[in-house]
């Protein structure tokens, strides 16, 4: 197997594991606010002593050697009942005193779920529409492709916002809205590949061998259609995560305080000048994911096309 | 223009025993309105090799495609073993396709570029759920039959020479053990030494497998190697037909003479 394919599969597997194992991996509940007065925008690697005080979790900067007193906001107080727990915030905290590491780990769930579901919806729609248009030709082709052109003429964010405003918000809505507005390019690629192959001797040859249409589709058309479609799709995953982020930012997407990488980055923009880590870590996770999908597409294309093996 | 000679030993029309029978077949391409075939009648009996010759553009490939039902004639009928191919339903026709195969003019275009030789040869058997499909020796056996080394099994078409490719295409056309092979210029893209060996192979396989062959070429000498009877096509029409030696020895149609002596003639009839 090619290096690219191996790296990307390893990365994506890791991401999947992180998303699935979020409850065990995340040090804290992603929505838990450690009192912002003392744990607001802590840089990565800071340690605080967490004290449970009823409904709130307080953070102390220091403990006295006998652990009976703690320093908080410049003054010493005595520890009442619960023993303070030292906690290191590996990736820092945000402006509400929430643990960035926990939020990034949990954000992987929402972002990947939305991205994968949306991608599947648009992939299936694109393959179907493009396949039917390319194979049937004529009026069907003209109608379907004009429809795709019309949808394509609008900026996707505009379509999505219009649909979200008219319909509903939340994860399912995002998947449906994004999925149904991002299949056009896939359809176009599928159609042109099928048109290219349809008239060739290679296809006539398998027709002449008496292969059934389903077998021709799966064994002699899809192997040509899938590589370019997969490259395109994998590159689109990043866009989809970003659009989901914009939507979440505008209040139509994944609703705060629940984290997605998108709304984490969106929330971080206000404090970017003081606290780079709030944006950089979800940004890095996003970049890594996009990269992994890109590598996956490239690796797959290499593998599916013998002329590129060497 | 009517055929100038219909006095061959075996009359081509109204022969009830013919395996393949084209009756007054015309094919007019849409858009361009080119009349690629015009009232063509040809019959191929079981075990017989019939040659078709004609200049470039005379309709030979169209004839080949119509004969194996890759294209429908606009008028006239194509019968295989007494069955009118135009009246068959999709799955009936697919099953019958095992009985007649086309060897394409351009083997690099006709072989699946993303399948290995082994996979390509197995594919027709897999698709028709033939038990031989799982025979591990199958590919090696067919490669040997077309005089190729079994080492070619894992190769892709672009990793083969032109001659090897044509042999693989031939093997694929024969794995379903058809009764009729339509060979569209099987050797014209190859250099003369390879050409000779592939023709030799064709002759041998025809004899071994008891194949009927419709051998198409622009070159009379190629056809003369195999065909007992020859049909000369000119602008989509049958210009002449008869026993091959007679056509060669005593050509009647202008088109035949042009083919026999190409350099001195003009292209326009
Ligand atoms: N798909 C098509 N659409 C329109 N016209 C076509 C098509 N295919 C072939 N023709 C025309 O039909 C005529 C016969 O073509 P055909 O390919 O059968 O000739 P040919 O005898 O096989 O030629 P060659 O020896 O060059 O292969 C030509 O004039 C060609 O331009
Ligand atoms: Mg031709």
Image (tube, coloured by chain):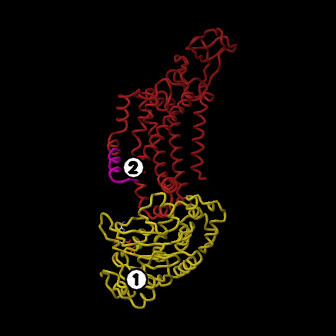
Chain colours: A red, B yellow
Q: Can you name the residue that lies furthest to the bottom here?
A: B249
- Write the residue at 48% across / 73% down: B19
Q: Chain of mark 2?
A: A
Residue A229 position within the rendered picture, expressed as x and y whole percent measured from the top left: 46, 49
Cβ atoms under marks 1 and 2 closer than 8 Å: no
- Mark 1 residue CB less than 8 A from any atom of ligand 1: no
Q: Which residues are magenta?
A: A135-147
Magenta residue check for A185: no
Please give the label number shown on residue A193: none
Q: Which residue is mark 2?
A: A188
Near-viewer residue (A254 or A69): A254
Near-viewer residue (A67 or A85): A85
Q: Chain of mark 1?
A: B
Q: Taking B230 as reference, is A78 above or below it?
A: above
Residue A143 position within the rendered picture, expressed as x and y whole percent measured from the top left: 32, 47
Q: Can you name the residue that lies furthest to the right here?
A: A66
Mark 1 residue crowding within 10 angstroms, few (<14) / some (14–19) / many (20+):
many
Question: What secondary structure prevails in the magenta region?
Answer: helix
Near-viewer residue (A278 or B19): B19
- Write the residue at 46% across / 38% down: A118
Residue A150 seen in this snapshot: yes
Image position of A98 (left or right of B151): left
Q: Which residue is mark 1?
A: B241
Mark 2 residue crowding within 10 angstroms, few (<14) / some (14–19) / many (20+):
many
């Amino acid at each position: 197997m090619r290096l690219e394919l191996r790296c990307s599969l390893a990365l994506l597997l890791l991401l999947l594991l992180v998303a699935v194992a979020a409850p065990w991996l995340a040090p804290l509940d992603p929505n838990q606010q450690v009192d912002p007065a003392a744990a607001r925008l802590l840089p990565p690697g800071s340690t605080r002593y967490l004290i449970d005080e009823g409904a709130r979790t307080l953070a102390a900067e220091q403990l006295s050697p006998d652990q009976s007193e703690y320093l908080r906001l410049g003054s010493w107080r005595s520890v009442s009942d619960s023993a303070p727990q030292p906690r290191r915030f590996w990736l820092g905290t945000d402006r509400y005193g929430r643990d960035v590491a926990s939020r990034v780990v949990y954000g992987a769930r929402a972002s990947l779920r939305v991205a994968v579901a949306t991608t599947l919806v648009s992939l299936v729609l694109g393959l179907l529409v493009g396949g039917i248009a390319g194979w049937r030709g004529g009026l069907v082709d003209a109608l379907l492709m004009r429809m795709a052109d019309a949808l394509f003429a609008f900026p996707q964010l505009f379509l999505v916002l219009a649909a979200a405003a008219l319909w509903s918000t939340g994860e399912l809505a995002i998947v449906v809205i994004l999925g149904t507005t991002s299949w056009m390019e896939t359809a176009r690629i599928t159609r042109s590949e099928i048109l290219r192959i349809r008239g060739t001797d290679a296809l006539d040859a398998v027709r002449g061998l008496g292969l059934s249409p389903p077998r021709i589709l799966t064994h002699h058309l899809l192997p040509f259609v899938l590589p370019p479609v997969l490259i395109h799709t994998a590159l689109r995953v990043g866009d989809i995560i970003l659009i989901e982020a914009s939507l979440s930012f505008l209040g139509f997407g994944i609703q705060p305080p629940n984290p997605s990488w998108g709304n984490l980055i969106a929330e971080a923009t206000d404090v970017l000048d003081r606290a780079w880590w709030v944006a950089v870590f979800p940004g890095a996770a996003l970049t890594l994911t996009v990269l992994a999908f890109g590598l996956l597409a490239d690796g797959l294309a290499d593998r599916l096309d013998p002329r590129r093996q060497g | 223009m009517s055929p100038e000679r219909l006095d061959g030993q075996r009359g081509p029309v109204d022969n009830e025993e013919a395996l393949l029978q084209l009756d007054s077949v015309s094919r007019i391409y849409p858009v361009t309105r080119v009349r690629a075939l015009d009232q063509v009648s040809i019959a191929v009996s079981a075990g017989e090799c019939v040659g078709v010759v004609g200049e470039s553009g005379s309709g030979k490939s169209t004839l080949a495609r119509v004969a194996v039902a890759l294209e429908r004639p606009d008028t006239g009928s194509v019968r295989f073993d007494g069955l009118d191919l135009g009246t068959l339903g999709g799955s009936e026709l697919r099953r019958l396709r095992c009985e007649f195969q086309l060897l394409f003019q351009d083997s690099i275009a006709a072989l699946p570029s993303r399948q290995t030789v082994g996979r390509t040869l197995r594919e027709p058997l897999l698709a028709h759920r033939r038990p031989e499909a799982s025979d591990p020796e199958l590919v090696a056996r067919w490669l040997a039959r077309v005089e190729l080394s079994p080492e070619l099994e894992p190769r892709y078409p672009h990793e083969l020479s032109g001659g090897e490719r044509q042999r693989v295409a031939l093997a694929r056309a024969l794995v379903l053990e058809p009764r009729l092979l339509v060979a569209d210029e099987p050797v014209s893209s190859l250099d003369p030494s390879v050409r000779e060996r592939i023709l030799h192979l064709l002759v041998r396989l025809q004899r071994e497998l008891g194949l009927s062959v419709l051998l198409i070429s622009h070159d009379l000498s190629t056809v003369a190697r195999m065909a007992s009877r020859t049909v000369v096509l000119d602008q989509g029409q049958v210009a002449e037909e008869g026993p091959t030696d007679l056509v060669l020895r005593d050509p009647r149609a202008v088109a035949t003479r042009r083919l026999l002596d190409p350099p001195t003639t003009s292209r326009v009839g």
